[in-house]
Amino acid sequence: RVCSRVVGTPQPFLRTRKLSRMADRLASIHGTEQDRVNCPFYFKVGACRHGDRCSRQHNKPLFSQTVLLAHMYQTPNSAVIQSGPTAMSTAADDTQAQEHFDDFYEEVYEELEKFGRIEELNVCANLGDHMIGNVYVKYEEEEMAEKALNALNGRFYAGRLIMAEYSPVTDFRESRCRQYEETSCKYGGHCNFMHIKRPSKPVCKRLGIRQTYEPARGGGGFGGGGGGGGGHCS
């Protein structure tokens, strides 16, 4: 008989190490532009302009701290009539539009607060079909978000059916448009990062919302994929 002896590291161990490295790499690029499987915009913003036609996957979470109320906020006509792609972006300068938004924000915040402590309530000022009027509420606990989701689905607001779903967005610093918050966004209301519409300081004071926020990290534009207790004030 001729006996052979395996020299070196056992093959199963090598395979395990290789799989581990592969898993680490996939985890590191998940939701980024390098991820060729999952849509980075859906991961960061919770909405994608391509919708069901997107070439990458939109993995909708089964549970989350954040609930999306799609297209819930309807801007008054005075804000929409303004010319150019930045109509919604400049609507905050319109006193009537701001008062309309303040009324909406306060009413919705007080209703959503019944389900648990709110960490953030963000309303999009974007004009794109996939983002216009989107309301994102992030709760302190996933159980609170679950209560809100179950209670809100099937209800109506201002005569329109509420469409509630879990959102993958939990860090709005990555979702918010940095250009929009620092100066102005060259893509205007059609930017694919969130242009957050903010309530006035008196509303924030009544709701007990802090009036500062962490800087946005998202880059304004159509490609690629940007905080704080309860909401943010203008």
Image (cartoon, rainbow, N blue to C red):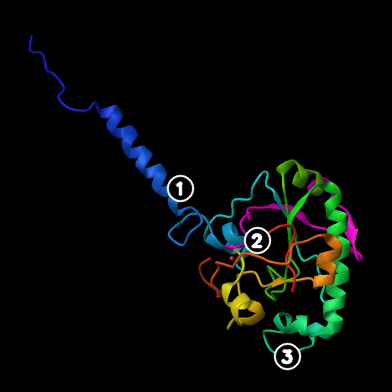
Q: Position of residue 187 (x, y in %)?
A: 59, 81
Magenta region: which residues? 149-174
Residue type, label 1: Ala
Q: Quadrant of residue 81?
A: bottom right
Is 76 positioned to the left or the right of 165 in the image? right
Q: Secondary structure at mark 2?
A: loop
Which residue, given by chain and number where applicable, does mark 3 sit on?
83
Q: Position of residue 143 (x, y in %)?
A: 75, 41
Front one among 204 and 143: 204
Considering only order in the chain, which callout, 1 or 3, is on the residue closer to the N terminus?
1
Which residue, given by chain and number where applicable, does mark 2 sit on?
227
Q: Secondary structure at mark 1?
A: helix
Q: Secondary structure at mark 3?
A: loop
What quarter of the picture does the C terminus occupy?
bottom right
Is 36 positioned to the left or the right of 199 in the image? left
Considering only order in the chain, which callout, 2 or 3, is on the residue closer to the N terminus?
3
Residue 104 sits above or below residue 168 on the image: below
Q: Quadrant of residue 196?
A: bottom right
Q: CA distance from mark 3 to mark 2?
A: 30 Å
Front one among 87 and 226: 226
Task: Specify the farthest residue to the top.
Answer: 1
Magenta segment: does it hold 164?
Answer: yes
Which residue, given by chain and number where applicable, does mark 1 sit on?
27
Front one among 98 and 186: 98
